[in-house]
Amino acid sequence: MIAVIRISGDVDLPGNIREALYRLKIRRKYSAVLIHPTQINMKLLKVLRNHVAYGTIDNETLTKLIEKRGKPLEKDKKINKDEIIEKLDKKTLSDLGLKPFFRLHPPRGGIDSKKHAGKGKGVLGDNKEKINDLIRRML
C-alpha cells in the first residue's frame, strides 16, 4: 500500500491539481489516503509530487494509523483493525466501514522544508520508507 499525505494547502492551486486531489479524497492539508501501487496511480502521483508526500507504508505504521485516526462510517460501530488490515488488499476502506481518508496532525517536531533551494525536495514527493516516520510524527 502507498500512503499519500497532502502537504500543500488550497491557495493558488491549478484547477487540474485541485481536481485530482479532490478525487483522491485528500481535500484538506495534512489529510492522508491509502492507494494501491497500480500504474495509473503512479502516473497520478507523478503529477501531484509537488503537492503531496507519498511512500510505502509498513504494517506497524498502518496498524497505528487505523487504530488512532481511523473513523467508522457509522458512529455506533467499532473498528476491528486486524480484520481491516487483513482485507485491505482486496477491498477499499469504505467497503470495510471506515472513512476513506485520515485526518492527521501537523508533524510534531516540524516539517522538513517543503523545498530546499538546490538541495532536494524536502518532504514533498516520493519518500519511500521515510513516510512511516512522517506518519508516526503526525498521529
Image (cartoon, rainbow, N blue to C red):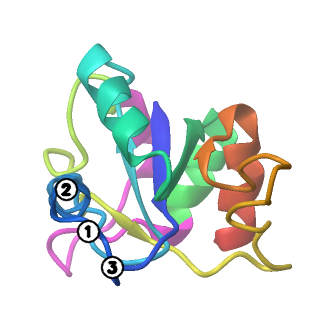
- Answer with mark 2 or mark 3, whichever residue precedes in sequence: 3
- Answer with mark 1 or mark 2, whichever residue precedes in sequence: 1
Q: Amino acid at mark 1?
A: Pro
Which numbered disc, 2 or 3, marks the residue closer to the eye? 3
Q: Secondary structure at mark 2?
A: loop
Q: Which residue is mark 1?
A: 72
Q: Position of residue 114 (x, y in %)?
A: 68, 65
Q: Amino acid at mark 3?
A: Asp
- Residue at 41% of width from left, 34% of height from top? 46
Which numbered disc, 3 or 1, marks the residue closer to the eye? 3
Of residues 51 and 137, the one nearer the viewer is 51
- Residue at 16% of width from left, 51% of height from top? 94
- Alpha carbon of mark 1 to alpha carbon of mark 2: how far? 6 Å
Q: Which residue is mark 3?
A: 12
Q: In this view, which residue lies farthest toward the front?
A: 118
Q: Amino acid at mark 2?
A: Gly
Q: In this view, which residue lies farthest toward the top?
A: 39
Q: Quadrant of the C terminus?
A: bottom right
Please give the label number shown on residue 115: none
- Up-down relation of residue 90 to residue 114 (above or below): above
Tell me, yes or no, whether the two marked residues, 1 and 2, touch with CB atoms within 8 Å. yes
Q: Which residue is mark 2?
A: 97
Tell me, yes or no, whether the two marked residues, 2 and 3, touch with CB atoms within 8 Å. no
**What span is in magenta?**
68-86
- Alpha carbon of mark 3 to alpha carbon of mark 1: how far? 33 Å
